[in-house]
Image (spheres, rainbow, N blue to C red):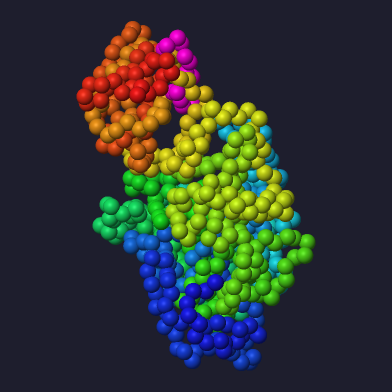
Amino acid sequence: MLRGSLSKTEARYSGVLLLLLGGLFNFGDFELVLAMDQTQTFSAPDSEVPSRPPNVVFILADDLGWSDTTLYGTTRFYRTPNIQRLAERGMTFTRAYASSPLCSPTRASLLTGMSPARHGITAPTCHLPEVVMKPEAPSIAAPNVPAPPLKSVTRLDTRYVTIAEKLRDAGYRTGHFGKWHLGAEPYSPLEHGFDIDLPHWPGPGPAGSYVAPWKFKDFDHDPDVPDQHLEDRMSAEAVRFMEENREKPFFLNYWMFSVHAPFDAKQKLIEDYRPRVDPEGTQRSPTYAAMIESMDDAVGVLLDTLDRLGLSENTLVIFASDNGGNMYNEVDGGPPTSNAPLRGGKATIFEGGIRGPCVVAWPGKVVPKSVSDELIQSADFYPTILEATKVSLSKEQPCDGQSLLPVLLGGSLGDRAIFTYFPHQTRVPDWLPPAVSVHEGDWKLIRLFHAGVNGNHRWKLFHLAKDQGEERDLAALHPDHVRRLDQKIEAFLKETGAVTPLRNTQFDASSYRPELEGIPVASRKSGAARKPSSRDARPDSMFPPVLGWRPDHQVRLEDSGKRLQLASLGKDPHISYALPSHLPAGRYSLQLSMRAESSGNAQWFWQEANRLPIYLKDRSVVFDIRHDGEKHDYRFTFVAESPIVSFRFDPSRGKGTVMIERIELKNDAGSVVMAWPNDTGRKLD
């Protein structure tokens, strides 16, 4: 519902009562005073009603996070004056959700009004050669995977009626500009209702770079602008489309490449942002900031053109993002951005992966500078646009979205629940097993498919009004809420005909570590985020633990009569040991007795309570070992600044064997606090 105090109820347009608002709005982390003439209304004589239906401009940013604009008071680094200008003209939504934390599923939902659970595109695989038109649910995966991820549909089926087809049939000129990522011919925009498609590119991001020269087929930079930015060129093409169709209704679908990887930008802008970086801030990439500014400039070009052509008053403009901000790639020595205060980012079902910026402007209909807390989702734009243009929904095609027109005209959507279907396990920080979530009011429930005891589902419950960062799982405290919301999830899956993940018939519960779900993965060599490796997509181990020691997927660990025998299968073998109770902070000395026939040095890590990442180079000791097959003793000391939670040992850097015969840990007083072997291999009291 709209936030603010009611000032007048006299406004009327097309028989709809508008609630004019004034007073003080809570706007993210700061307050915005909305000043309105108390006598102002949005009524208009019938003679002033435009004779033609409204134009529609849909601007979709790629990977733009909730905190990547100035809309919500969550950034002091990025500059987005044109998106802010759009907000001055219309309504800002504070709880706008993408249909998926990844791009292709959301894009399919925008065009069809259907959930990914229904249309079947649940992963961004539409650029791959294999054509898959029905989702598949495998039943076998690695032993440490509770539920194998689905095999996603890889093309947007042409049997679906898209928003472009509906509008073109109603007399609109339709143009698609920018990223598509829903399939090449015969599944391109030209087969889905668009008269024009530039640059007619099926890939997941820009071809090569943002700054020319690019690598698109048959789409080059302007000859007189050798270092042209891609968004400058795309916005110029969109301007030409509007100019050529100013006398007829048009649908401009401007799906930006920005701010998806690759990470490059205008050098002048990068240098402009470099001195503005706050080393203590969470958003520190001058390259990413420059990319955001170029994206915002393109928004400004479109708004300026609408104003210049006299079309603004009869144009519905929508700005949104396809998923949350990217927090797992590396640029300028760290992650591209931060979605704080939200948890997670792109490719996660946590808030940072699905909640994004959203503004809708429609002069004369939508109250300027208004703010809405209504729950909305990508699929809602399909029925919204059709109702605004007075085009009926197709009776033969289900619609999972709900028209936002009541909210835009001052009313409410009433009680509703929205669902996010993400049956995948990704290689990113804050990962989760295949899941589905429901938002209702302030509650959010996540169902983890078959990740519970005996292959049953497991749940995470959050109260977002009190816990925006999803730090406190309340599932155990509120079982009634879990049951009620999970019933809604089950009804949603049944109604959409969703193909759901199956229980892994090869699952071994002893090889799965649920305590690592949602824990950010960072480089062991530094605290900086990195591009995820294949190991990040899954819990640590493919092999079961031995005497409390848990091997990673590159180690086969065996109990060889009071000795641990490690067979290294790769270049980064390691084992870890979770202490049954914490060791106090302080100085410790460690002695290792072992035989090695492998290569490289060794490294001993200790994990400290409430410190991330779990294992860090600064909390480790690197030492040389002899790979001659003979027994050798190794001694070193280390200091833990916080209580110790667990240990990790990297015995070598290559393939081979290591035999550990003795591990003894002493505190600063010389007392043995942990020794192995003993009867159980566990910590001594």
Query: In the picture shown, does residue 643 fall above or below 240?
Result: above
**Residue drawn at the location 39% of the way across and 78% of the way down:** 33
Identify the residue at the far left of this view: 669
Query: In the picture shown, does residue 164 fall above or below 507?
Result: below
**Residue drawn at the location 73% of the way across and 60% of the way down:** 398
Quarter of the rendering occupied by the C terminus: top left
Query: In the picture shown, does residue 89 fall above or below 68?
Result: below
**Residue drawn at the location 66% of the way across and 46% of the way down:** 153
> Which residues make up the magenta segment?
548-563
Q: Is residue 247 left or right of residue 520?
A: right
Task: Note whether residue 226 is visible.
Answer: no
In percent of width and height, residue 671 lies at 26, 21
Please state which of residues 18 and 364 is positioned toward the viewer in this rendering: 18
Quarter of the rendering occupied by the N terminus: bottom right
**Residue drawn at the location 44% of the way across and 69% of the way down:** 83
Please state which of residues 147 and 109 is positioned toward the viewer in this rendering: 147
Identify the residue at the far top of this view: 630
Identify the residue at the far front of this view: 685
Disc tally is 0
93 inside magenta stretch: no
Please state which of residues 492 and 224 is positioned toward the viewer in this rendering: 492
In percent of width and height, residue 589 lies at 25, 23
Query: In the picture shown, does residue 275 fall above or below 297?
Result: above
In percent of width and height, residue 672 lies at 29, 20
Task: Note whether residue 6 is visible.
Answer: yes
Q: Quadrant of residue 227?
A: bottom left
In percent of width and height, residue 16 lies at 63, 83
Q: Quadrant of residue 625?
A: top left
